[in-house]
Image: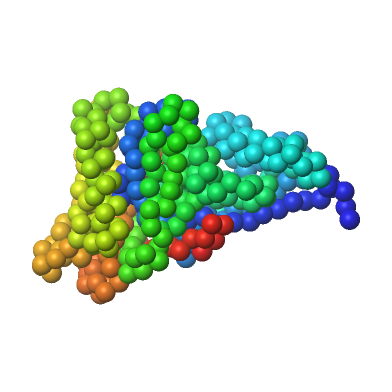
């Protein structure tokens, strides 16, 4: 057998996108990436949106760690977030090696990470969430770390806040935590996807362009300049978190939907209240909002909910029994042939295992 120095060790994983229904917006600590409010998301299936990442290491690799994203080499040294994730993962591996001298010294080997999204990067489709979750999961698998997804979420959070929620499937809460060192700012599964198998999500790609204001920059402008922001973080979100967890527990779609739509609107209101104001939604996004309200009004019950991240793309939640009504109508009225849309595709809630593979 080749000596461990010459061997190439490798692990491959995929990670899903998650779409928040209670949005994370604002950091109380920008270095540790600690949020000002808790958030809750739904993990989407990996059939349409996922990041595929392979991490390898070898004593024979050139000295520096490398990262290749969608075929382009990235400068890891200038990305404090990537460095923070890698150094935490290495420290965990080092602890294993210190405890068991028979383990190969992978922590000393340079890492080679190759990552690919099957959807546009940085277009408000949560690419950083899937990206950092896949990076952390792949390196943790390579290093054979025993840490649970919840423990790994602490590491992924340092890459991108929303990434901590992509290590689990179903309905995932990221608790803001209270400790200054961030050790209690973790993601946890509120309910598995199997708890509410009728849930569906329709992703409408209004634009696959890179967003105008990246979320990290946008949220700190909001934190620093919006009076509405503090009200949302302190008084509005805690109640909504409790209410949406109850709605999920009871599979109460009308409550889930109303809280989701209201929180998307409040989040975008704080963006508009920022100085200078930040606009993520556009005319086509607003047409989707009107259409969902029209569908719910005409049907006479709440069958659809929209939500928008830091970009114009709409995600519409509905239950399978209302597919024709919701997805059919949205597709017919705002389908790929409509001016202003780049396209549309369906997705559904994921069932993600602990290894991050659905
Ligand atoms: C609007 O997780 O991309 O999608 O922590 O600075 O990387 P950083 O921000 P990021 O922000 C996501 C913001 C959001 C809401 C959400 O996903 O909760």
> Residue shown at 67%/50% (left/top)?
144
Nearer-the-camera pick, 93 or 277: 93
> Residue shown at 30%/58% (left/top)?
249
From what the image shows, is residue 256 above or below residue 90? below
58 on left or right of 337: right
Q: Is residue 331 visible?
A: no
Judged from the image, the quadrant occupied by ligand 1 is top left
From what the image shows, is residue 226 above or below residue 208? above
Horizontal and vertical percent position of residue 176: 38, 37
Nearer-the-camera pick, 153 or 329: 153
163 on left or right of 306: right
Q: Which quadrant of the rendered structure holds the N terminus?
A: bottom right
Q: Residue 270, located in which quarter of the rendered image?
A: top left
Horizontal and vertical percent position of residue 202: 33, 63
> Residue shown at 23%/43% (left/top)?
239
Horizontal and vertical percent position of residue 244: 26, 52
282 on left or right of 26: left
Horizontal and vertical percent position of residue 185: 43, 37
Q: Is residue 8 visible?
A: yes
């Amino acid at each position: 057998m080749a000596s461990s120095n010459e061997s190439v060790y490798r692990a491959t994983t995929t990670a899903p996108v998650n779409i928040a229904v209670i949005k994370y917006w604002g950091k109380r600590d920008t270095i540790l990436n600690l949020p000002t409010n808790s958030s809750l998301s739904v993990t989407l299936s990996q059939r349409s949106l996922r990041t595929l990442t392979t991490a390898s290491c070898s004593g024979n690799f050139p000295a520096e760690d490398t990262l290749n994203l969608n075929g382009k080499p990235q400068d890891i040294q200038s990305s404090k977030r990537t460095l923070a994730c890698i150094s935490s993962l290495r420290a965990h591996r080092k602890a294993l090696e210190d405890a068991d001298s028979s383990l190969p010294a992978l922590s000393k080997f340079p890492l080679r990470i190759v990552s690919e999204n099957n959807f546009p990067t940085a277009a408000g489709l949560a690419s950083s969430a899937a990206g950092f979750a896949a990076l952390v999961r792949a390196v943790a698998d390579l290093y054979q770390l025993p840490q649970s997804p919840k423990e790994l979420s602490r590491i992924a959070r340092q890459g991108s806040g929303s990434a901590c929620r992509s290590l689990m499937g179903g309905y995932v809460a990221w608790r803001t935590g209270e400790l200054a060192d961030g050790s209690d700012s973790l993601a946890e599964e509120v309910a598995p996807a199997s708890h509410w198998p009728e849930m569906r999500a329709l992703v409408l790609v209004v634009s696959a362009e890179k967003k105008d204001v990246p979320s990290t920059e946008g949220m700190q402008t909001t934190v620093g300049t919006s009076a509405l922001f503090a009200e949302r973080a302190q008084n509005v979100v805690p109640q909504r978190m409790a209410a949406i967890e109850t709605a999920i527990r009871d599979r109460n779609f009308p409550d889930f939907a109303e809280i989701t739509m209201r929180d998307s609107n409040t989040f975008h209101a704080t963006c508009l209240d920022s100085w200078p104001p930040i606009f993520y939604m556009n005319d086509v996004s607003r047409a989707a909002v009107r259409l969902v309200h029209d569908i719910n009004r005409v049907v006479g019950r709440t069958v659809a909910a929209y939500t928008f991240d830091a970009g114009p793309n709409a995600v519409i939640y509905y239950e399978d029994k209302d597919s024709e009504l919701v997805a059919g109508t949205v597709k017919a009225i705002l389908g790929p042939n409509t001016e202003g849309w780049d396209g549309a595709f369906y997705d559904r809630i994921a069932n993600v295992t602990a290894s991050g593979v659905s």
